[in-house]
Amino acid sequence: MGWNAKIVLVSGARPSRFFLRITVALAVLTLSPLPLIGCSGEAPRVYVSVAAGDRFSCALDSDDNAVCWGRDDFEKVFVPEIPFVALSLGTDHGCGLTSFSTLECWGNNIFGQTDAPGGSYAAIEVGSVHSCALDADGLIECWGADMDGQATPPTGAFVAVTAGYQHSCGIRPSGSVECWGKNDFGESDPPAAQFSTISAGASFTCGLTQEGVARCWGRNDQGQAAPSIADAASVDTGGTFSCGQRVSGVAACWGDLMDALLMPPPNVFTMISVGQDHACGVLETGALKCWGNNMFGVSSPPRM
């Protein structure tokens, strides 16, 4: 919500995050880059990736340290103090791929979504209340809520995985996409194309073809599955909106933009991540910038 926000996936696929929509009474547009000078004269942290979830966000700095902010229920902003190379967030839980290629999860575990398996992994992707990971052999393992089969992946090798609200998808070595789980709106019926990245949202899915074309399928009542970007370098999905990063690094978003609250700032980003009703990105300077709903400070990244 990829809510997912997932931050690193094999073959460049992006985590994504996927959640029940929250009606926000007071939404504040926040554009919050980190300052160029750190606190007490210290050098500012340089961030390399960010993950947006539902009412919370997390980021990784250049030393593999993670920091989270936003709503702190279920202790979901208290990320373990271990080195990570990738993070992905869901509704009330998060998971990370450690520098040792192992998995570590935290937050709400009512469906077992933080009970990460042991072993060696190459990518992690968190959905709303389930999680999926790609192991060292290209096999997908999922855990957590499985009422619609979203945590029961098909057998065989994949090169990327993404987890949405109640469905999941993966990219085969051939570039074709295979999805499983809920399919009420066609979110699990991918087009016959070869993809390089993929991101599952709430009842819809988007991806970037190997020709560099952004394509989406599934629920489109808010325009969330109708890409407005022709020169995409990445695509990420959220609750009822999506964003893509242009080849130039400038972001573009489409879908329910909450009366322009979710229109991205005109900055150049190295990567972006979409949550339920906010998005965050890493600037060329290594600073963080978020926009959209700011309830619980979810769009106010740390300044150190």
Image (tube, rainbow, N blue to C red):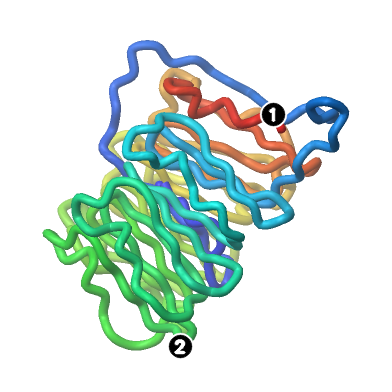
Q: Residue at x 48, y 56 (%)?
A: 6
Name the residue furthest right. 41
Q: Relative to 36, is 227 on the left or the right? A: left
- Disc number for residue 279: none
Please state which amino acid type lies under the numbered disc 1. Answer: Arg
Does residue 140 sit above or below 8 in this rendering? below
Q: Residue at x 69, y 51 (%)?
A: 48
Q: Relative to 197, is 212 on the left or the right? A: right
Quickly name the residue at label 2. 137
Please state which amino acid type lies under the numbered disc 2. Answer: Asp
One can see residue 2 in this view:
no
How many numbered discs, if any?
2
Does residue 294 sit above or below 198 in this rendering? above
Image quadrant where one finds the C terminus? top right
Q: Residue at x 58, y 43 (%)?
A: 67
Does residue 132 sit above or below 216 in this rendering? below
Q: Please state the horizontal and vertical placement of residue 166, each as a whole percent of the image.
A: 23, 54
Does residue 156 sit above or below 213 in this rendering? below
Q: Residue at x 80, y 41 (%)?
A: 285
Q: Secondary structure at mark 2?
A: loop
Q: Answer with the quarter of the image where residue 291 lies.
A: top right
Mark 1 residue crowding within 10 angstroms, few (<14) / some (14–19) / many (20+): some
Q: Secondary structure at mark 1?
A: loop
Quickly name the residue at label 1. 303
**Disc 1 vs disc 2: Cβ atoms closer than 8 Å?**
no
Q: Nearer the viewer, residue 31 or 175?
A: 31
Mark 2 residue crowding within 10 angstroms, few (<14) / some (14–19) / many (20+): few
One can see residue 104 in this view:
yes
